Amino acid sequence: MAYFEEISKIQYEGSSSKNPFAFKYYNPEETVNGKTMEEILRFSVAYWHTFTADGTDPFGVGTAIRPWDHLNGLDLAKARVEAAFELFEKLNVPFFCFHDSDIAPEADTLKETYEHLDVITAMIKDYMKDSKVKLLWNTANMFTHPRYVHGAATSSNADVFAFAAAKVKKGLEIGKELGAENYVFWGGREGYETLLNTDMKLELDNLARFFHMAVDYAKEIGFDGQFLIEPKPKEPTKHQYDFDVATGHAFLQKYDLDQYFKFNIEANHATLAGHTFEHELRVARINGMLGSVDANQGDTLIGWDTDEFPTDLYSTTLAMYEILLNGGLGKGGLNFDAKVRRGSFEPEDLFHAHIAGMDSFAIGLKVAAKLLEDRVLEDFVADRYSSYTEGIGLDIVEGKANFHKLEEYALQLGNIQNRSGRQERLKAIVNQYL
Ligand code: XYL
């Protein structure tokens, strides 16, 4: 059965095409620096936003019209798998991602939930056999059910810690079964609401214990996917422990976990933390910790995680600039952790949204590659820091300076001359490439 009958496979038609169901810029076969767009961009569909969510928001019920709406329970879960593979195929995306609870309904007992997961995992595996689509990552939902009211691995209740561990154990088994390239931890409720009732040290120590157990179990079963932490500063908790990349990195280093983890960086989480998307990518990149990306965008006028499909070309360009400098995303990809707006409730909007996101990143890739090829920013930055390539600057960089030597040098300096940072000129040059 076809769920999106009216829509055929989306093809690349070029920028002059007026066909809404065509890519204008994303041409999977086109090469950029010797690799195809498909290989570099590694697009992924997020199961939760595209097949599970219905447009519910804090003020109103769902608005989405979906061809599987009339079904329930496991029948609904199965229909979603069928619809998912139809959409993957038609959009020609190479990857998808899910939480356990997106693919199969949670039952009253953990045992029954496992049974549901087994049925749907087998079905997904079957579909994957006849498809080129791979699992970018899976994860466990440890934030929706009331049991996670005080967190999962950072809960004040050890029973919840144990329950969460069982969910991740199962998640790793599923990841292995489906050949997942990564496993994600997003700690939505791993944080606190008030310090008045919180043992922060125990919660953080427990979170590290939990991650070490996950690493051990992955080794035990031979799961070789990359572990990823997805930082977010807040929402739903007031303060989330994986606040941003820098905070998460310090945590991983403190607990000897940095060798096993990288980061899954989400654009809208970066902006919630008061950073730009490219800032988070840069911090991860220069520390060798850039794993994967949740490609979306927020809204400057709204203070929460709006998870919009990415259409801001300035942002996709600067993101792709970081990704290219990183030598690509390795096992990671660009996962559209993005939802159609509540007012875009028709099934075809799922296609328009993904086409918009894929085209926006394709433009970003091409512009970033050209910027790098012309060394627009590299030459400027190299020149800006040239004082460290000779004289006292070179001594500082080579560890040949100390406060005595620097004082001696400073004492004989006349007026210090600085040079302009030329921010506006550089922005204008970037605009010339867009
Ligand atoms: C919510 C988060 C999640 C993670 C996976 O803000 O983005 O959707 O990506 O748990």
Image (cartoon, helix red, strand yellow):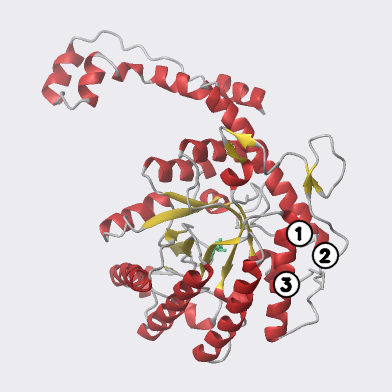
Compared to 230, does 363 lie above or below? above
Residue sticking out furthest to the left: 404
Q: Please, what is the three-letter code of the amino acid marked with disc 2?
A: Phe
Depth check: 173 or 276 in front?
A: 173
Q: Amino acid at mark 3?
A: Glu
Q: Position of residue 201 (x, y in %)?
A: 28, 68
Give me the C-alpha separation between circle 3 and circle 2.
11 Å
Q: Residues at badges 1 and 2 in contact (C-beta under 8 Å)?
A: yes
The residues bearing labels 1 and 2 have C-alpha atoms spaced at a distance of 10 Å
**What's the amino acid at mark 1?**
Leu
**Of residues 403 and 249, the one drawn nearer to the viewer in this rendering:** 249
Badge 3 is on which residue? 82
Query: Which callout, 1 or 3, points at the residue further toward the start of the chain?
Result: 3
Q: Quadrant of residue 162?
A: bottom left
**Label 1 sits on residue:** 350
Residue that label 2 marks: 4
Element marked by disc 3: helix
Location of residue 275 with respect to 197 vertically, above or below: above
Question: Ligand 1 near label 3 (Cβ, under 8 Å)?
Answer: no
Residue 141, image x and y in percent?
53, 73
